[in-house]
Image (cartoon, rainbow, N blue to C red):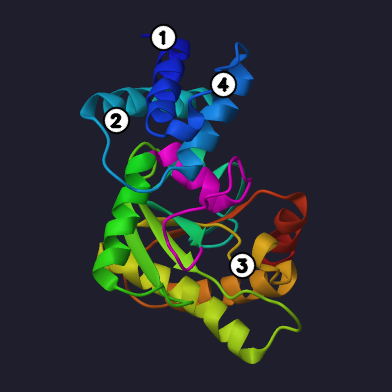
Amino acid sequence: MNQSEKRIFLIQELLKENAVYQDVKIPADAAEQRQLLRGLMNVRMPHDISREFLDIQDSYLQEETENKQITDVDTLVPVQNGLYIWQGDITSLRCDAIVNAANSGMTGCYVPNHKCIDNCIHTFAGIQLRLECSELMRKQGYEEPTGKAKLTSAYNLPCRYILHTVGPIISGRVTDRDCELLASCYRSCLELAAEYELESVAFCCISTGEFHFPNDRAAEIAVDTVKKFLEQKSSVKKVIFNVFKDIDRDIYRKLLG
């Protein structure tokens, strides 16, 4: 199968799962097919699927990621000892672990084609990620507390693992408690990475964007917390501040030089 044939197969299989989709027509345009496939993956509840589907999905997603051009952490240049700033798509970064800004349900974003990092990571990792997260939450028995972290496989992403953390949601002014919880997100991820003896961790801008934490204050907390952690002896030697927007790139450059 080529990529087009794989994509159509995956769409057909997902459409068959729900009678609501019986009248959905697969568009001829490749970009529209990609959008439909992503949307179907986004809204799919966590439950098992055939080995054939997973094999074809894995092959398809890995080629899609390869086509985005993978960046290896070893090619990056630190701005300070052990600290990096990298602007790009975190789902195309090869390192030990990337950090996902999750919600308290921990099974990903269910809004079709939403642009949040939670949606992107779950989309390009594959449906196995939602299944693993769902099992973790089933065993836990309650929603994920803000400021904690969990580790899962990365499946079809170029990194080895994903660290999931729930940041504070800001609805008014930022409180001291909000700042403490955000710092806890960074510490929890780093402590979990060290527990698994990981060397490189890439952080997204936790709690900014959809969760409305001010970008500049969030970056200050991120840098301060990471620097303090790196003063300790652990396996973690490289921390990448992954930014997508120019505003965040400029903030981190100002903080780190």
Q: Position of residue 123 (x, y in %)?
A: 47, 40
Q: Amino acid at mark 1?
A: Asn
Spatial separation of the CA atoms under disc 3 and disc 4: 31 Å
Circles 2 and 1, Cβ within 8 Å, touching? The answer is no
88 in the magenta segment: no
* In the image: residue 172, left or right of residue 143: right
* Alpha-carbon span between mark 2 and mark 3: 32 Å
Q: Which residues are magenta?
A: 103-126
Q: Which residue is mark 2?
A: 54
Instruction: Give the structural element (helix, strand or loop) at label 4.
Output: helix
Instruction: Tell me, yes or no, whether the two marked residues, 3 and 4, touch with CB atoms within 8 Å.
Output: no
Read off the residue under disc 3.
207
Q: Amino acid at mark 2?
A: Leu
Residue 33 marker? 4
Q: Is residue 178 left or right of residue 106?
A: right
N-terminal label among 3 and 4: 4
Helix, strand or loop for disc 2: helix
Q: Residue at x 28, y 62 (%)?
A: 136
Amino acid carrying label 3: it is Ser
**Residue on which the image places disc 1:** 2
How many residues crowd mark 3 within 10 Å: few (<14), some (14–19), many (20+)?
many
Label 3: which secondary element:
loop
Q: Earlier in the sequence, mark 2 or mark 4?
A: 4
First of labels 2, 1 by sequence position: 1
For the residues bearing labels 1 and 3, Cβ distance under 8 angstroms: no
Q: Which amino acid is tagged 4?
A: Gln
